[in-house]
Amino acid sequence: MIVSPSLLSADFGCLKDSLRMLDESRADWLHCDVMDGVFVPNISFGFPVIEAVAKLSPKPLDVHLMIVDPDRYIGRVRDLGAMFMNVHAEACTHLHRSIQAIKAAGMKAAVTLNPATPVVMLEDVIADLDMVLLMSVNPGFGGQSFIPGTLAKIRRLRELITVSGSSALIEVDGGINATTGAQCAQAGANALVAGSAIFNAPNPKEVIETLSSLAS
Ligand code: DX5
Ligand code: ZN
């Protein structure tokens, strides 16, 4: 299982220590949640913070943009050295164009779906995607409860990926812990984002290890 810890739940006063801990852990990627206060009702952090993070950490960046019209920032995200640029299907008027532009900029393209957006929305672009990020909470805040209906959605997405011959990975974000993570793994997820379950734990590395050992 790929594990992508969400920095949103880290202590921003000692980000350097958190990044060192993650570097020493089995975490695969760093999940960076960018919020604009418009697409979601919260504001998190932006490019200057992620630039600093990128300098301090060797882990690939998994950038999740919860912002309107994310195409405006493709060049900025590329300049961060991001591996994945995740854009919300609900925030892109011309999703096909956004996906092509992300790939043309040299990044892997991921599309994120809100809990209310059905998997079928991706039928005509799934072959072009490197990853689909399914939100298992309504985006905007860490520490929310996993929406159980996500499990059936993972299975529907797995079926779409198989039928279309796409090589897209399935990532799940929101309310992930050892229990919900195991359920997602069983349903067919390849990657798990976890914020509060990791950073609020007495031993974050152990939680990462547990998630990482889940068979997908
Ligand atoms: C929520 C963000 C998540 C968040 C997850 O909008 O996209 O990445 O940090 O936090 P937890 O794991 O606490 O639900
Ligand atoms: Zn996220």
Image (cartoon, rainbow, N blue to C red):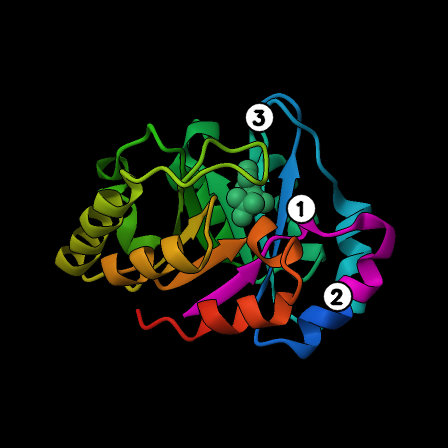
Q: Does residue 10 sit above or below 35 in this rendering?
A: below
Q: Residue at x 20, y 51 (%)?
A: 155
Q: Which residue is mark 3?
A: 40
Distance from mark 1 CB to nearest ligand 1 atom below 8 Å: yes
- Counting from the top left corner in percent of width and height, residue 68 is at 57, 27
Could one spot residue 119 in this view of the protein?
yes
| Amino acid type, residue under disc 3 in the picture | Val
Q: Residue at x 37, y 71 (%)?
A: 214
Nearer-the-camera pick, 202 or 190:
202
Say whether residue 172 is magenta: no
Distance from mark 3 CB to nearest ligand 1 atom below 8 Å: yes
Say whether residue 42 is left or right of residue 188.
right
Say whether residue 9 is magenta: yes
Q: Quadrant of residue 97?
A: top left
Say whether residue 57 is left or right of residue 160.
right
Q: Residues within 10 Å of mark 1 (few under 14, many from 20)?
A: many
Q: Residue furthest left?
A: 163
Question: Mark 3 or mark 1, which is nearer the start of the sequence?
Answer: 1
Secondary element under disc 3, as helix, strand or loop, is loop
Which label sits in the foreground, 1 or 3?
1
Residue interval drawn in magenta: 1-19
Q: Quadrant of residue 166?
A: bottom left
- Counting from the top left corner in percent of width and height, residue 187 is at 24, 57
Say whether residue 180 is left or right of residue 77.
left
